[in-house]
Amino acid sequence: GWWPGVNIVGKEIVRFHSIIWPAMLMSLGEPVPKKCFGHGWLLLDGGKMSKSKGNVVDPYILAEQFGVDALRFFLMRTFPFGSDGNFSNELLIQTINTDLANDLGNLVSRTTAMVGKYFGGTLPALCGTWAEAVSFDTELKDLAGGLRERYAAEMDRFAPHKALEEIFKVIQRANKYIDENTPWTLAKDMEANGPRLAHVLYNLLEAARICGILLTPFMPESMDRLFSQIGADASARTWDSAAKWGGLPETAAVSKGENLFPRVDMDKALQELEAAVEAAKQAESGVELEPQLAEKVDFDTFCKSDFRAVKVKACEAVKKSEKLLKFTLDDGTGVDRQILSGIHKWYEPEELVGKTLVAIVNLPPRKMMGHESSGMLISAVHKEKGEEVLHLLMVDDAIPAGAKLC
């Protein structure tokens, strides 16, 4: 991408964007970029992705499967800017499960559920403060309160993976904070411990709010849902509000919605991805195949069909027919066999003379345009972009006429 002052490109074309592109801009009197950043490649099995190699990963399929937010997060979280990164579907799913489902999703889900269970979805006023000094509180507040500054420093260095690392230090600390305070134990005596429980839950919501603001550039849609669940209004979602602890209204309306990031079943997801990739390939090529028959045929029934190699002695178009070709065939019996086939759309008669084909020879004879057809030639058929495509089955000419296929 390009905008005045900064140019971000693939590392293999830095020369063009550092020399030729600025020269073109200068010739037009336009401002030139002051910095040019080259990002690395995504590798697959250690090699650069390439359409010519056929080893590309389709981001649209991944986004459809896991969501744009999760995909964008994975790329920014996993691969340092400027360095190459080795992509795999397994690593993507593992990152979603570890960071998004287990850490972030679990934090929001547990906290909102407890606010609903213990306080009916609204914490009491003054829950944001606690008179006594508690080390757990101080550690979480200090870590989250200074997060924006650490995050901004890493983003200014074009190190989004490091910025995300700082966010997840806070998320992991917040999950530890739950275990340190054991809210479910406090809830056993609400009269004595209710105020402390409310303060603990407020701290968790506030930590989630600050992290949500800083995660917004990576996962905007998911963070909108996070803010709705923790009750953060527009004023509590701003960049400025992320620099200060306590921006979430104490009596914000909290609701436990659907899990932000459900855990992904690795095996099932990989199977679904494989099927989606195959379907996309077929859609791109326009190939449509007849579904396989579900009804099973026993072996004896199959053996009743007599398939034989036949050699084309002569072939001609049937008069007054646009489709039919009339074949004179050597089927190994010493007596010529005549078969008619509606394949003139795909083949001219002269190109088939001398070819070795496959025919089923024990079908009852039938009349076609006044000619008798004794058998049927075997073809492979499919559709491409809605049009039927046919390939006559041709076999090795070394196979003698009359050889049985089994």
Image (cartoon, helix red, strand yellow):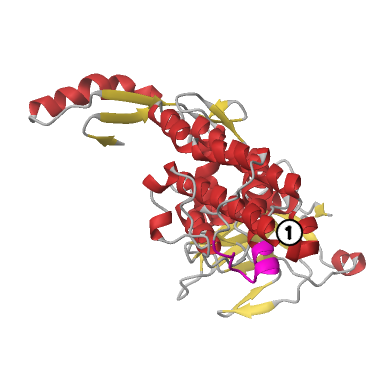
Assign the N terminus to one quadrant of the image.
Answer: top left
**Apparent side of residue 23 relative to residue 41 in the rendered image (left or right):** left
Residue drawn at the location 39% of the way across and 59% of the way down: 234
Image location of residue 74, percent across then percent down: 55, 41
> Does residue 217 appear anywhere in the picture?
no
From the image, tell me which residue sits under label 1.
193
Residue range (magenta)? 113-125
Assign the C terminus to one quadrant of the image.
Answer: bottom right
Residue drawn at the location 79% of the way across and 63% of the way down: 189
- The vertical placement of 238 against 87, above or below, is below
Q: Residues within 10 Å of mark 1 (few under 14, many from 20)?
A: some
Depth check, front residue: 392 or 147: 147
**Apparent side of residue 325 relative to residue 20 in the rendered image (left or right):** right
Image location of residue 233, percent across then percent down: 43, 61
Image quadrant of residue 18? top left
Identity of the amino acid at label 1?
A: Asn
